[in-house]
Image (spheres, coloured by chain):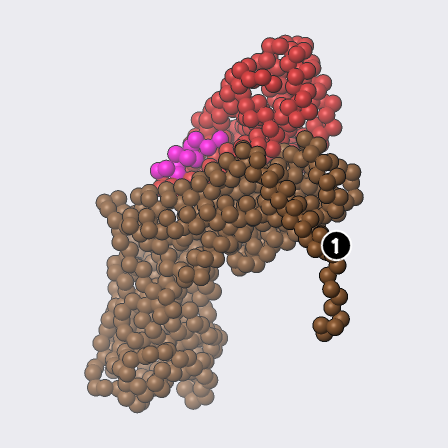
Chain colours: A brown, B red
Amino acid sequence: MSAATLTPPRPGTACGHDGFARLLHAEWTKFRTVRGWVIAVIVAALVTMLLGVYAGARSQEGCPGGPCHYTIATGPGGEAVTDAYYLVHRPLAAHGTITVRVTSLATVIDSGLSPQGPSGTQPALVPWSKAGLIITAGPGQGAAYAAVMVTGAHGTRMQWNYAGDAPGLAGGVSAAAPRWLRLARAGDVITGSDSADGTSWATIAAVTLPGLAPTVQAGLFATSPGYTAPGSQQLTGGSSSGAPTDATAAFDRVSLRGGWPGSPWAGTPVNGGPTSISYPAGATAGYHQAGGTFTVTGSGDIAPGVTGATPADALLAGLFVGLIAVIVLGALFITAEYRRRLIRVTLAASPRRGRVLAAKAIVVGAVAFAAGLAGSAGAVLLGIPLLTGNGGAIYPASRLTDVRVIAGTAALVAVLAVFALGVGAILRHGAATVTVVITAVILPYLLAAGLPVLPAGAADWVLRITPAAGFAIRQVIPAYPQVAGSYTPSGDYFPLAPWAGLAVTCAWAAIALLLAAFLLRRRDA
Amino acid sequence: MRHALHAEWTKLRSLASTPWLLLAAALLTIVVSAAAAAATRCPAGACADDPARISLTGIYLGQAVIAVLAVLAVSGEYGTGLIRLTLAATPRRLAVLAAKAIVVTGLTVPAAAAAAGASLLAGRLILPGHGIGPSHGYPALSFSDGPVLRAGLGSVLYLVLIALLSLGAATALRDAATAIGVVLGLLYLFPIIAAVGTATVSRHLEQIGPMTAGMAIVATTGLSSQPISPWAGIGVLAAWAGGALLLGGILLRLRDA
C-alpha cells in the first residue's frame, strides 16, 4: 500500500469519530448519575480488597503456637522447589564422567493409614520414584543440578534444575534388564546418556548449568515422593499429597574418569528440614557399600513445587462477591433502559444501534476493569505482606505472574461485565439476564471447584467450555507433568492455561455481544 | 384473604413465563443431576460418594430458576407499576405478601417434587453401573430407605424455602435484577468465601450459609462429616427465608409503593 492510494479522510469520518466520543460521554453520564450503581461498584472493589486483607491477616493454619516461618526453597530460576533426597557423593572437578549400572529400584509405601493392621510398609509402585546419578552444586536447598535416573514407571530420564525433564529409554529396571547411566561434565555443560547393555550409549540431553562452581558434588541418589493410589478421593494435587514412601536402589560397576579429587564417598541426606521429608514408618535414609555394590535409600523429591506456601490467588476469593455486583451492573446497564423505555430515546438520538452497544460495552467494561483492578491489586498487594508478616509463606511467583494474576483478574471482571451487557441486550430482562450470567459463570466454578460436587473429569470439562473457564487466569502454581498429583479444579488447577481460559470467556462475551448487536438492529426497541 | 389468594393465583398463573420457568426448573434439575450421575465413577468401589447427593446435584441449578419465579412474582409488579393497583385492591399489605407466598409455594411444590423424584430415579438407574449401587455396599436409592426419603422430601422443602427467601428479598429490594443478584449471591458465595477462612471460620460460614446449610438435607451418608445435621441445616435455611419475608413484610408496610 503506497501513500498515493490513501484517500484523505472525509469530513464525515471526523464527525463520526466525534459522534462516538459523544456517545461514550452519554453512556458514561448514564452510569455515573445512578448513585446505586456507583456505590455498588465501589463496594464491590472494597469487598474484594478487604477479603484479601482478611485472608492475609487471619491466623495461619498449622501454627497454633505462633508464626511457622516456613522456608520456601527456590531453585536457580527463582521457582519454588522440593529438594529432598539421599545423596552419596564425592567432589568432581571441571571435567569428569561417572558411569554406573542400576540393577533394581524398589519402593515401599507406608501402610500405617490403612485399616488392615498396624503401621508398617508394603511394596508399592511409586511412578515418580527416582534413583541414579546426579551432579549438583551442593547439598543446599534449591542448588543447581543435572541428573540422569531410572524411575518407577516413567522409564529412564534426564532432569535438571527442577523444571527440566527429558525422556530416555522406556521401561523399568530389574536385575534381568538393568540400566546403565552416564553423566559427563565438561565445564558448565552436563551430558546424560543411558544404555541397556553398557556398550551402545544414547545421549538423552546435554544441558548447560550457568555459573557452576569449579568443584561440585557428584554421585548416586535415591528419592521417592509421597503417593496416593489413583481413584482415591483424598488426593488434592501437588507433590505433598499421599502416604510416605521411600526408594531403595542398587548400583554397581561404578566407574569414574577425569577429575575426581581423592575424597572418599560420603552420604548426605538432603532436605529442607523435618517438615519437608517424610519417610515411611521404620525406614531411614542411608547407603550401604559392599564391594562394588551401593545400596541407597531415600525419600522426597527433586522437582518443582512446594508444600506449605499460599499462592497469591488464595487472596482473591472476594473477587466472586465483586463479580456478582458487576454482573448485575452490566445487566442493568442495558435492561434498565428497556424497562424505563429510555432505550427509545437513546436509539432515536443515535440511530446507529451497533455503536450504542459498543459505547455501552466500553463504558461498562472500563468501569468493571477499574473496579477489578482496584480490588485485585488491593487484595494481593495488601494481603501478601500481611500473610508473610503473620508467619505464612507466599508461593514464590515471578513478578510477571503477579501482574498476570492482578491484571488478568481485572480483565476477567471487565469481560464478564461485557458478557452480562450482551446477554442483557439479547434478553432485555434484568432478572433473567442476571440469573443466566450468574448460573453460567459462578455456578460452574462452584460445582467444579468451590464445593466441589462434580467428579474431576466432568469438572475439567465444565471449566473448559463454560464462561467460568476464565477463572484460570488466577492460577499461580503450574501443573508439572513430572510431579505426581491430581491436578483437579478443587486444588486450584484449571484444565486450561491462564490466557486460554480467559480467551474462552472472551469468546463467550464476543458471541453474546455480536448476537446482541444483530438482534438490536433487527428488533424494534 | 381468599380474595387476595385468588387474585395472586390468577396473576401468576396467567403470566406466560410461569409455566416455562417451572418446566425449566424441573428439567434443568433433572438434566444436571443425570449428567452428574453419569460422570461419576467409582472404580475402587470404596469412595466416599453419597449417591443421593450426586443424584440431586441439579438442585444447585434448579434453585436459581425457582428463585427467578419467586422474585418475578413481586418485582414484576414493581416493574410494571401493577403493585399500586394490587395494594389499592387489597390494602392489607401483609395479606398480599402471604397470598403471594402461598401461591409461589403451591407452584414450587409440584415442580420440585417432579425434579427431585426424577433426579433420584435417574441416579437409581445410572449410579449402580458406575460402581455406586447396592452391590457395592451403598443403600439403594429407594423411598423405603429413611435417609433417601428425607433427601427427596427435603429437597422439595429446600426449593420451597429458596422460593420464600427470594420472595422476601424481592419484596425488600423491589428491583428484579438486584433481588436475583442478591439471592444468588447469598446462595453461591458462602462456600467460596468459606474457603478463605480458617477451618473453624469456614465451618461456621458453611453452617450459616443458606445453601450450604440447607443442602445438608440431601446428605444420606457420612452425616458426621457434614458441617451441620440435615434438619438443623434446613432449619437455618428456614430462618433465612423467615427473616427475608419478615424484612420484606416490614418494608412493604412502611414504604410507599
On-image quarter of the C terminus of chain B: top right
**Closest to the observer: A226 or B125?**
A226
What residue is disc 1 on? A12
Residue at the (47%, 38%) spot, across then down: A43
The quarter holding residue A241 reads bottom left
Residue at the (30%, 90%) spot, across then down: A258
- Subunit of label 1: A
The quarter holding residue B76 reads top right
Q: Is residue B36 visible?
A: no
- Classified by dominant secondary structure, the portion drawn in magenta counts as helix
* Residue lying farthest to the front in this orientation: A11
Residue range in magenta is B200-210
| Residue B141: x %, y % from top left | 57, 35
Residue A442 on the magenta segment: no
Badge 1, how many Cα within 10 Å: few under 14, some, many 20+? few
Amino acid type at image mark 1: Gly
Residue at the (59%, 25%) spot, across then down: B174
| Residue A480: x %, y % from top left | 45, 63
The quarter holding residue A158 reads bottom left
Position of A192 compared to B256: left or right?
left
Position of A68 compared to A16: left or right?
left
| Residue A276: x %, y % from top left | 30, 59
Q: Is residue B148 above or below residue A465?
A: above
* Residue lying farthest to the left in this orientation: A263
Residue B202 on the magenta segment: yes
**Closest to the observer: B15 or B44?**
B15
| Residue B52: x %, y % from top left | 54, 37
Residue at the (72%, 36%) spot, across then down: A345
